[in-house]
Image (cartoon, rainbow, N blue to C red):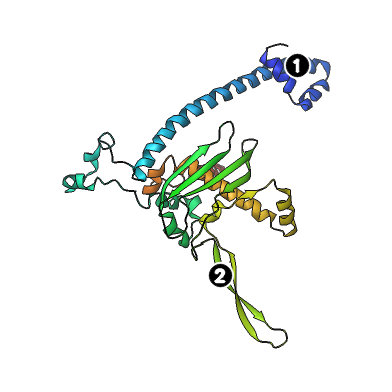
Amino acid sequence: MSNNPAIIEVQEFPEEIKKRIKGLELKVKLKAIALNVYLMEKKSLDTKLEREMKKLQKQYDKQAAELYQKSNEIIEGSRLLTEEELKDVDFYLEGDEASQKNSALIQEPLYGFWYNALKNSDIIAQEIKERDEPILKHIIKVEYQQQDGSENFTLLFYFQQNDFFQNTILKKKFVLKDGENPVKSEGTMIDWNEGKNVTKKQMKKKRVNKTTGMIDFTTQEVEAESFFNFFKSINLEDKEIIEKLVQETKLDKYQERMDIDYDMARMIIDEIIPYSLEYYLGVKINDAYDDIEDMGQDSSEDSDNKDDNKFR
């Protein structure tokens, strides 16, 4: 067997392309065959580039993980600040803060840090309801773990002891198909304290007695919008669940919930964890997404300007 990457690539090339080349007239076919050699070499380069990028990404992720760990130690208050971390402190101090610095160096969690960082993200803020806010203020650490050998990942939220639930860690794992499409998510079952479940609410329902005409009311527990719905498990590959949802015309809503959860997870991993201080301070609000919108707006403005120029 040849070790030529181009030849190996030809064997894996889509049959439709080879079929179309065979259907060309001879003089065109010969040129297409020759062009295909360079196409295959380019494909080989693409594969090599992808391998190198994955190696570089692993090195970057390892170094970044160390930075996240050090940041989390400060946020959760697991250690005192170091002299190296405070080398630029004089630039930031005002008034008599310099004389109070030593007494302010306390080893304790930065209360409400992750709540503010999450709240200052437009995408996450849409899912945070008023009843969620006092719970989210108890988050002391957020981290994610990449599953070895796959694109599957898990988000972990660490909580201080609180009055709402017994869990100290809430997890959400995403299983991806073809490395990019979420098909399953596994969330922690939250052990809510009595009367504290913010994903449920009580609704009064009116009932009319058909015989007597008397009206009474019954209380019914229904689903409530909440950030903590994020931790509910979803399985788009379970045929029984899908069939039941189709019959109840709820499949679209089920799939939409997966999309919402995945977008939230990617936002937290790609933006909020790496740039947590910027989100906490409110100086960075979904910049990556805003850039896309700005580009669209600029394109529209450019188009309008070109139209205006036609009449000048």
Q: Nearer the viewer, residue 299 or 290?
A: 290
- Identify the residue at horizontal 47%, vertical 31% (top origin): 61
Count of numbered labels shown in the rendering: 2
**Marks 1, 2: nearer the viewer:** 2
Q: Residue 177: tell me if it is visible.
A: yes
Look at the picture and state if 206 lies above or below 139.
below
Q: Nearer the viewer, residue 43 or 292?
A: 43
Circles 1 and 2, Cβ within 8 Å, touching? The answer is no
Give the SS element for disc 1: helix
Left or right: 108, with 296 as reference point? left
Look at the picture and state if 244 lies above or below 211.
above
Q: Residue 94: tell me if it is visible.
A: no
Question: In the image, residue 274 lies at what x, y percent?
Answer: 43, 39
Give the position of the N terminus as an image quadrant: top right
Q: Which mark is residue 202?
A: 2
Look at the picture and state if 156 lies above or below 34.
below
- Residue type at mark 1: give it: Ile
Q: Which residue is mark 1?
A: 33
- Residue type at mark 2: give it: Gln
* Disc 1/disc 2 C-alpha distance (Å): 70 Å
Q: Which mark is residue 277?
A: none
Left or right: 143, with 185 as reference point? left
- Disc 1 crowd rating (10 Å Cα; few below 14, some 14-19, many 20+) is some
Single out the residue that lies furthest toward the bottom: 212
Q: Nearer the viewer, residue 27 or 64?
A: 64
Question: In the image, residue 224 lies at what x, y percent?
Answer: 56, 63
Left or right: 152, with 21 as reference point? left
